[in-house]
């Protein structure tokens, strides 16, 4: 990512409860938080990749499309149909039902956002539906940068997760995001901030201050020219273009 030493920031937002059997109160909190998050993103002119389980049937899709900010809609995947506990047949069927149907309806779905599961095979099924980005949880300390997988697909690991589990004395979520952006800016790297609205909605008291502060910081840093904002699809387009333009190094030795 050399050439532009500003950090590249991707924000993804999960708009599903972690447990499908969540209570009515939790679903109402999630609906309220969805509207608050979309309003905050709109006020700060911040594009994001919004993940829902099924774009065609999600009530959030209409709200996302109505925003004055051009967001990306992605599909949220979990262990019920992605990864080692699901068969290839089930993965293919669910991809077609969730992604294929959305694309047929005119939604340019290009990103698969995974929650607590990894994708280690069946990349051909992902590529067949023209998906270019897969969000994974970071298992490494520090910045986790995008990596090419197969068939033009890029892995975009999470750098910072909200809700944040870090201690308050280290600055909490705001401190973690600021440090990640500062490190990424030194090399023109990527920071992937993942906001799990479903986890916030499961709390007894809905407090969005943590998210609002982080989004405000990101917007201020963008205004100051410290970072650029991208959806997952935007970033994979850039990564793919850079990879195609990279010079090919010959393995042949020059003649003596």
Image (spheres, rainbow, N blue to C red):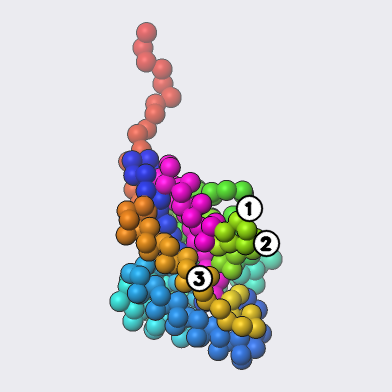
State whether residue 193 appears in this view: yes
Closer to the observer: label 2 or label 3? 3
Local crowd at mark 3 within 10 Å, few (<14), some, or many (≥20)?
many
Local crowd at mark 1 within 10 Å, few (<14), some, or many (≥20)?
few
Q: Which residues are magenta?
A: 174-198
Query: Between residues 88 and 40, which one lies in front from this camera angle?
Result: 40
**Residue at left 65%, top 60%?**
167
Q: Which residue is mark 3?
A: 211
Q: Which mark is residue 84?
A: 2
Q: Determine the secondary structure under disc 3.
A: helix
**Residue at left 55%, top 62%?**
173
**Marks 1 and 3, the one that precedes in the sequence:** 1
Q: Residue furthest right?
A: 85
State if disc 2 and disc 1 touch (CB < 8 Å). no
- In the rendered image, the quadrant that contains the N terminus is top left
Question: Does 180 appear in magenta?
Answer: yes
Q: Determine the secondary structure under disc 1.
A: loop
Q: Which residue is mark 1?
A: 139
């Amino acid at each position: 990512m050399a050439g532009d030493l500003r950090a590249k920031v991707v924000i993804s937002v999960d708009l599903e409860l972690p447990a499908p059997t969540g209570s009515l109160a939790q679903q109402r909190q999630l609906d309220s938080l969805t509207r608050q998050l979309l309003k905050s993103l709109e006020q700060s002119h911040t594009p994001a990749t919004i993940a829902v389980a099924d774009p065609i049937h999600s009530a959030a899709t209409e709200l996302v499309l109505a925003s004055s900010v051009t967001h990306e809609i992605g599909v949220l995947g979990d262990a019920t149909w992605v990864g080692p506990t699901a068969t290839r047949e089930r993965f293919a069927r669910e991809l077609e039902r969730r992604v294929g149907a959305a694309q047929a309806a005119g939604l340019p779905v290009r990103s698969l956002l995974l929650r607590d599961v990894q994708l280690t095979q069946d990349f051909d099924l992902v590529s067949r539906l023209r998906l270019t980005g897969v969000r994974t949880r970071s298992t490494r300390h520090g910045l986790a940068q995008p990596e090419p997988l197969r068939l033009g697909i890029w892995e975009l690991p999470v750098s910072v997760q909200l809700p944040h589990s870090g201690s308050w004395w280290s600055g909490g979520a705001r401190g973690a995001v600021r440090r990640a952006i500062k490190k990424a800016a030194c090399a023109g790297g990527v920071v992937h901030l993942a906001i799990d609205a479903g986890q916030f909605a499961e709390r007894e008291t809905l407090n969005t201050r943590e998210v609002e502060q982080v989004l405000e910081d990101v917007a201020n840093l963008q205004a100051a020219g410290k970072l650029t904002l991208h959806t997952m699809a935007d970033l994979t387009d850039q990564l793919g273009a850079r990879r195609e333009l990279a010079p090919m190094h010959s393995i042949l030795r020059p003649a003596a």
